[in-house]
Amino acid sequence: MTHREVEPRYVEPIMGLVFDLDGTLVLSRHDFPRMRREVIRAAERHGVTPGRLSVRDNIPRLMEEAAGEIQRANLPEGFLFKFQAEADQALDAIEMEALPTTVARPGAKELLAVLTEKGYRLAVLTRSSERFARSALQQTGLAGFFPYLRARGASGPVKPSPDSLLLLLKEMGVPKDRALFVGDHLLDVECGLRASVLMYGLLPQEATPDGMTAERFLAAGAAAVATDLPDLGRKLGLPKSPQPTPAR
């Protein structure tokens, strides 16, 4: 884990909140093992030695390792571009397969309504494709809360690069020391810390043996951990804790 370079001042009050999407605001059934396999297949078709990449690594690491291998092999520049395009196309297709069963996480709409009413600026930062992200927000009734969104296909770096978060905050007009980033994955913690932005962990809806826990979030550097979205509202000191409606 890369430590933050500059300690944030965390000026109060918070002006804007940036949310991760999948697992944080919406619940979907992405086939991540298949996604990892497709990235590896694309990498091996474009110059990466078979067996060099591991399906145990997450997708950001696989993309980074594959790009490094292609560059170190001194292959023509087109190999890297073709690999990235092919991998992104495969990831996009698998993500869209999960859209029909994607639902809002319980409490999302209620929390976002209160935050909007209180005047907070809201945004989504996701590694999903823009097509999936916007479709998922529209399908779950959350699109209207987010005038700002940065997804995998955006120009420039993607999460967990700190610049992805900082570019989004600049677009929102929110100083980084008046922002809060909320996510359910270790990559979210890494992104927030490296950007010197206050970061809250959100426990996954369903606990798994290898999933995030409060202890893992805090050990990684999260400032606080919420058990669910209503608990996040309480931690933000909202006057009325939003109660979740059943996922549909």
Image (cartoon, rainbow, N blue to C red):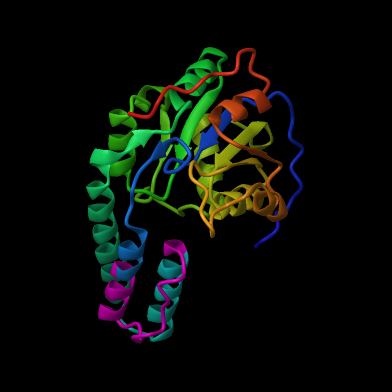
Q: Is residue 183 magenta?
A: no
Q: Position of residue 29 (x, y in %)?
A: 33, 48
Residue 56 painted magenta: yes
Q: Residue at x 45, y 71 (%)?
A: 56
Nearer to us in this view, 82 or 243: 243
Rendered residue at 25%/79% (across/down): 45
Residue 111 percent across, percent down from the top left? 51, 22
x and y percentages locating residue 194 in the rendered image: 64, 53
Name the image quarter holding the C terminus. Answer: top left
State the residue in front, 5 or 21.
21
Total residue callouts: 0
Q: Is residue 38 left or right of residue 56?
A: left
Please state if 61 lies on the left or on the right of 238 as rendered: left
Q: Which residues are magenta?
A: 38-60
The residue at the point 48 percent across, 39 percent down is: 24
Q: Nearer the viewer, residue 207 or 61?
A: 207
Q: Position of residue 6 (x, y in %)?
A: 74, 50
- The answer to whether 88 appears left or right of 7 in the picture is left
The answer to whether 194 is drawn above or below residue 75 in the figure is above
242 horizontally vs 52: left or right: right
What quarter of the picture does the N terminus occupy?
bottom right
Could you tell me which residue is drawn at 31 percent across and 36 percent down?
A: 136
Q: Is residue 162 above or below residue 56?
A: above
For residue 220, which quarter of the picture?
Answer: bottom right
